[in-house]
């Protein structure tokens, strides 16, 4: 009776997850093996691995993968460094701490579209505030076209992404810091430990699980980042900001080749699954 009751409680959530996640994923994987083009008279026929063969013989998939990995690595590393530094500052008894904690959440609460448009104005070459400040400080001699520059388009997206995601990382790490018993630091201070030793022997070990979860969430979220790339650069200039999510969209909704677009999404789905398994395995092994 208890088992039946438990099944009845779980069933609605299971059905919702199946229709919202499982079925669309399976359908997308199945579609990746079809010659599925959205055009008049097109036959949605089974073409085995043809979509994958075409992708792996094209340079664009490798370029998109490289751009995705560079973007994810840069954002996650900087998020953790800056997030931990800010969290430790806000964990101290500084003046206006509660106000700062509330204000710092504003970028995270802002919609992605608004964040992208806001930073496009900041990066605007003629009247953007960033160029104005840099020129006034004599750091640059003339205005830089940030989001349309081959060299600066990706860094511009990285900066925007950092600005928006940093509050979430800070809140997560701050919650972890506040759960560390103060007695640990007091005992370490009595034993003669300095702040660096306390950081590596008390703070980081206690934050281990928080960092593990936060890093994994951040990697997955940034690996499939689409809105910032599409709104700010559309994958340009010259494909320098075409990540895997943009490549999926272009194949499916620009070129109207749903089969090929589904193949790209399946590739990065598999990559994320493999990475998640290895990531959790590494952390579990280290804990042992």
Image (spheres, rainbow, N blue to C red):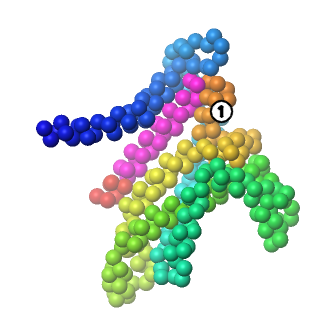
Left or right? Give the position of 4 relative to 233. Answer: left
Q: Residue at x 47, y 56 (%)?
A: 215
- Any magenta on residue 101? no
Q: Residue at x 54, y 74 (%)?
A: 99
Left or right? Give the position of 136 relative to 173. Answer: right
Image-quadrant location for residue 138: bottom right
Q: Position of residue 105 (x, y in %)?
A: 55, 64
Q: Position of residue 127 (x, y in %)?
A: 83, 59
Write down the residue under mark 1.
250
Left or right? Give the position of 66 relative to 202. Answer: right
Q: Residue at x 55, y 26 (%)?
A: 52
- Any magenta on residue 263? yes
Q: Is residue 194 above or below residue 134?
A: below
Q: Viewer-proximal residue, 241 or 169?
A: 169
Left or right? Give the position of 74 relative to 279. Answer: right
Please rate how many residues cluster around mark 1, counting C-alpha atoms within 10 Å: few if below 14, some from 14 to 19, many from 20. some
Image-quadrant location for residue 76: bottom right
Quarter holding the N terminus is top left
Quarter holding the C terminus is bottom left
Q: How many marks?
A: 1
- Provide the residue span drawn in magenta: 258-282
């Amino acid at each position: 009776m208890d088992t039946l009751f438990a099944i009845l409680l779980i069933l609605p959530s299971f059905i919702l997850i199946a229709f919202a996640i499982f079925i669309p994923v399976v359908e997308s994987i199945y579609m990746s093996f079809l010659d599925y083009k959205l055009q008049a008279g097109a036959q949605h026929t089974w073409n085995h691995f043809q979509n994958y063969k075409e992708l792996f013989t094209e340079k664009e998939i490798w370029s998109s993968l490289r751009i995705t990995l560079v973007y994810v690595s840069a954002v996650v590393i900087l998020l953790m460094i800056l997030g931990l530094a800010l969290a430790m500052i806000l964990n101290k008894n500084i003046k206006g701490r509660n106000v700062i904690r509330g204000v710092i959440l504003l970028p995270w609460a802002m919609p992605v579209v608004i964040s992208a448009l806001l930073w496009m104005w900041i990066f605007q070459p003629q009247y953007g505030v960033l160029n104005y400040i840099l020129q006034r400080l004599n750091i640059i001699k003339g205005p830089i076209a940030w989001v349309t520059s081959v060299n600066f388009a990706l860094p511009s997206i990285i900066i925007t992404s950092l600005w928006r995601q940093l509050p979430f990382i800070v809140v997560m790490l701050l919650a972890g810091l506040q759960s560390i018993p103060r007695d640990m630091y007091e005992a370490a201070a009595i034993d003669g430990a300095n702040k660096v030793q306390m950081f590596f022997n008390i703070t980081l070990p206690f934050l281990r699980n928080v960092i593990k979860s936060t890093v994994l969430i951040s990697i997955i979220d940034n690996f499939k980042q689409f809105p910032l790339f599409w709104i700010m650069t559309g994958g340009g200039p010259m494909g320098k900001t075409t990540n895997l999510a943009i490549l999926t969209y272009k194949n499916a909704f620009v070129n109207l080749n749903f089969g090929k677009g589904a193949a790209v999404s399946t590739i990065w789905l598999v990559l994320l699954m493999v990475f998640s398994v290895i990531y959790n395995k590494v952390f579990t092994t280290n804990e042992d």
